[in-house]
Image (tube, grey):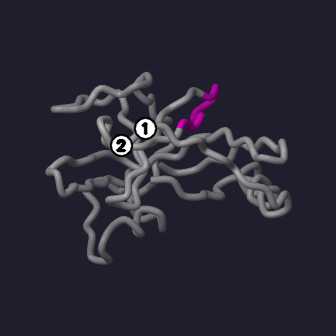
Amino acid sequence: MMSAYNGSSSSSSSSMMMNRVGSSILFPIHGNVYPTGYYNVTINIGHPPKPYFLDLDTGSDLTWLQCNAPCVHCIEAPHPLYQPSNDLVACRHPLCAALHPPDYKCESPDQCDYEVEYADRGSSLGVLVRDVFSLNYTNGVQLSPRLAL
């Protein structure tokens, strides 16, 4: 999942800067309906930034990356596996609460677990983390806010 997070002063100043620049970010779309069956965009994440393909998932509000955790029946990622930061979103954080029903019980208070199941019986299971996203605006401004995914 990707959402703005203003947890530090540099992130806060980045948010203020984004509101002032009045620019856009363009993400060229790759893929096709047939024969590939999916679309994705490339975005740079981490420090130093590395390119990753994000699936344009119309079946949920989550954006996720396949990470280096053990995986069963996983599709092969077209990029190196994501090495998550250690900046976990806590279970009681508002970002985590937005993923779950109000009566959700945390298995681990230190992290926000999620699971989404799709109509084709596929699924994604993981944890919400914060990391640096390198964003290049159409007017030339470059920002690197910490966002959650």
Question: Is residue 120 part of the magenta span, yes or no?
Answer: no
Specify the amino acid type for callout 2.
Tyr
* 2 or 1: tag closer to the N-terminus: 1
Please provide percent x and percent y for residue 133: 62, 41
Q: Quadrant of residue 142?
A: top right
Q: Does residue 81 sit above or below 6 in this rendering? A: above
Are there few (<14), some (14-19), or many (20+) residues within 10 Å of tag 1?
few
Q: Which residues are magenta?
A: 42-49
Question: Is residue 47 part of the magenta span, yes or no?
Answer: yes
Q: Which residue is mark 2?
A: 38
Please provide percent x and percent y for residue 3: 54, 58
Please provide percent x and percent y for residue 2: 51, 53
Q: Quadrant of residue 118?
A: bottom left
Specify the amino acid type for callout 1.
Gly
Q: Which residue is mark 1?
A: 31
Please provide percent x and percent y for residue 108: 30, 53
